[in-house]
Amino acid sequence: MTPRRLLSRSRERAAAIAVAAIALGAAVAAYPRAAAAQACCVGTGLVTPARLRTFEDHAVGVQMRARSVMGAFSGTGSFAMSAAGRREVGFEEDLFGALRLGSRFQIALSAPFVQTARAEPGVSGFGGGLGDVAASFRYDAIYAGTRGSWPGVAILAGVSFPTGQPVDEADDPLATSSTGTGSYEGNAGLGIEEIFGRGFVSLSGWVSKRSARSTM
């Protein structure tokens, strides 16, 4: 099988995944029923793709994003625009769900679908697929507004799995079929929350550690 035919099949597969993910999101959004959405706090953090409020038992959602790379920062911190003829555009659709286990503990799962289009002088490519699936955990030690002047405090943790294809295993010249890091990554942190009248402020901080991996 020729490299051109392999690249064509990779593009067709990535396009089919993107269309299916977008169609699923549109179908969920268009389904006629009473509104039961959160007013806030969905997709607000790295380790908490969905945050359930005290009276919520579960949530399912989808978020979509797009990016365009216009340049890069050097090791000294200076920014350089992309050279003429070089282009990169990325898309991502995340399907996620959250479930409450008891009054203070909740878990969430996020599955990203990634597509990338790149172009260099004389060559271009498009590919994608399933990215790195992530699971997150949240324990609310103190709820905001329940301990006088004390803010709400939540313990956060998460782990991502190398379900995506790393860049060194991409099957096209521009590595557009790469969708993941190829490593496990763990996260741990704290979430601080406070209520001011009708306002709600949330601040999260965390540390991350990625597992080592070797490439051939």
Image (cartoon, helix red, strand yellow):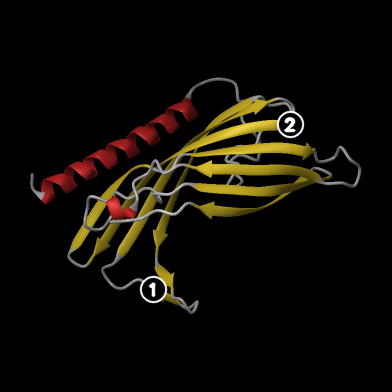
Q: From this view, report whether residue 104 is shown above or below residue 152.
A: above
Disc 1 marks a residue whose amino acid type is: Met
Quarter of the image with the C terminus is bottom left
Local secondary structure at mark 2: loop
Would residue 191 be visible to someone looking at this image?
A: yes
Question: Label 2 sits on what residue type?
Answer: Arg
Q: Is residue 94 left or right of residue 125?
A: right
Horizontal placement of 108 versus 7: left or right? right
Mark number, residue 115: none
**Which residue is found at the position 28% from the left and 55% from the top?**
175
Query: Which of the two residues, 84 or 160, is positioned nearer the viewer here?
Result: 160
Q: Which mark is residue 104?
A: 2
Say which element carries label 1: strand
Q: Residue at x 41, y 76 (%)?
A: 80
Where residue 207 sits in the image (x, y, percent)?
61, 54
Could you tell me how far apart the alpha carbons at marks 1 and 2 are, in whole angstroms? 47 Å
Occupied quadrant, residue 55: top right
Looking at the image, which residue sits at the far left? 1
Of 51 and 25, the residue lying toward us: 51
Please give the name of the residue rendered at 77% of the width and 46% of the height, measured from the top-left corner: 199
Query: Residue 92, how many percent across, how many down?
Result: 42, 45
Residue farthest to the right, as pictured = 148
- Residue picked out by circle 1: 81
**Marks 1 and 2, the one that precedes in the sequence:** 1
x then y, percent, for residue 171: 23, 50
**Quarter of the image that includes the N terminus:** top left
Image-quadrant location for residue 146: top right
Instruction: Report x, y in % for residue 4.
Output: 12, 50
Give above or below for 121 relative to 150: below
